[in-house]
Amino acid sequence: MLTDLPSELLLDIASRAFRLKANRIALLLTCSTLHAVTVEILYRNLRLTSRAQLESFLNIYRSQPCNILVPACSIELELTDDRSNDVFTDINSLLSICRSVKGISLDENGRLALDLFNLKCVSYVSGRPDLIQECMNQLNPRCFVWTGTDPPHHFSIAIVSPVAETLFEAFKSFTRLSHLKITHISFPLPLSLPEIPSLKTLYIGQAVFFPVESLTYITAISKAMPWLEEVRLVDVYHETIWGLRVRRSDLEAMSEALVYIPLEGVLPSQSSNDEKIPLVVVAKAAAERIHRIVICEAQTERLIGGDRAGVDTILV
């Protein structure tokens, strides 16, 4: 009998079947055992794929969050059909509801301690980055992902400059953040990337006006991110997409410049404890660290003009 299977095996079977949308109602209605397992899958890894689903969820649970029996461990929102200015109002409401569910994991500041927060939407909020700031103030995830809504071959900007500034300011308070992925972003000028001590992997894709100097510092000069294992830059441009992509050699050259000619008051090359270490040794160590953990790639080729690096090419 299906109900005699070990719970771990039953959960694995149900999870695989649940991936097909047509199976979900059947799983919920088959028997009480499968119903309980499916509800666990449905709410523990909360995934809403349209604005209509998000609004439906809010309409059902806004006044009665106690009816959600399983607290969320991850939240994925794929709002590819929505470009309105008030979508982040609804996302804020969703996070507030999830925070009030019995048994939810919260950090010491009452923020959602999620395993994953995955957002696929645009940030056209007409001068209201404060709405996104409110969202970030409710989160302290282990993995944070924000990608654009267009297909991979279509270069577009989903995260505009004012929002990017708000985002990276919020990341400073993410004390659990291990994995960060951001794509389709226009960086503000100037921007100092935050040092996130817990971060292990950083992925940035389809980005323009990228702060090479700041990344070089937190990657190779600063000692505030000891767990950082990999930095991937995919189709990341110094300025616009008509210019050059960022290459690993750009960071290596920048690391040498920061060691020998640090920016006064901003990017010190050595602390007082390093005064006896020759600068040539510091420069070599910085370049080696960049070579070890930084990967720059060209994934999407232009039809005409721009940086003709080829498809799926490692940029050294």
Image (tube, grey):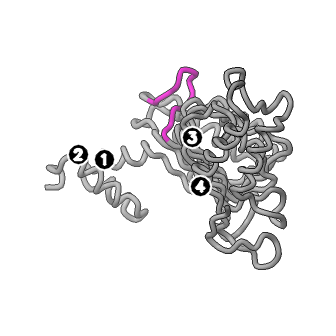
Tell me the CA gap for discs 3 and 2.
36 Å
Q: What's the residue type where badge 3 is placed?
A: Leu
Q: Secondary structure at mark 3?
A: loop
Q: Say above or below: 120 vs 196.
A: below
Give residue 18's quadrant in the image.
bottom left
- The residue at which mark 1 appears reads as 37
Tell me the CA gap for discs 1 and 3.
36 Å
Q: Is residue 106 on the magenta stretch?
A: yes
Q: Nearer the viewer, residue 256 or 306?
A: 256
Q: What's the residue type where badge 1 is placed?
A: Val
**Residue at point 42%, 28% (across, down):** 103
Of labels 1 and 3, earlier in sequence is 1
- The residue at which mark 3 appears reads as 228
Task: Give the quarter of the figure containing the C terminus.
Answer: bottom right
- The residue at which mark 4 appears reads as 78
Give the class, few, some or many, for how many residues have Cα within 10 Å of label 4's Cα (few <14, many ≥20).
Answer: many
| Marks 2,1: beta carbons within 8 A | yes
Task: Give the quarter of the figure containing the N terminus.
Answer: bottom left
For the magenta stretch, what is the residue range? 104-115
Of labels 3 and 4, earlier in sequence is 4
Tell me the CA gap for discs 2 and 4.
30 Å
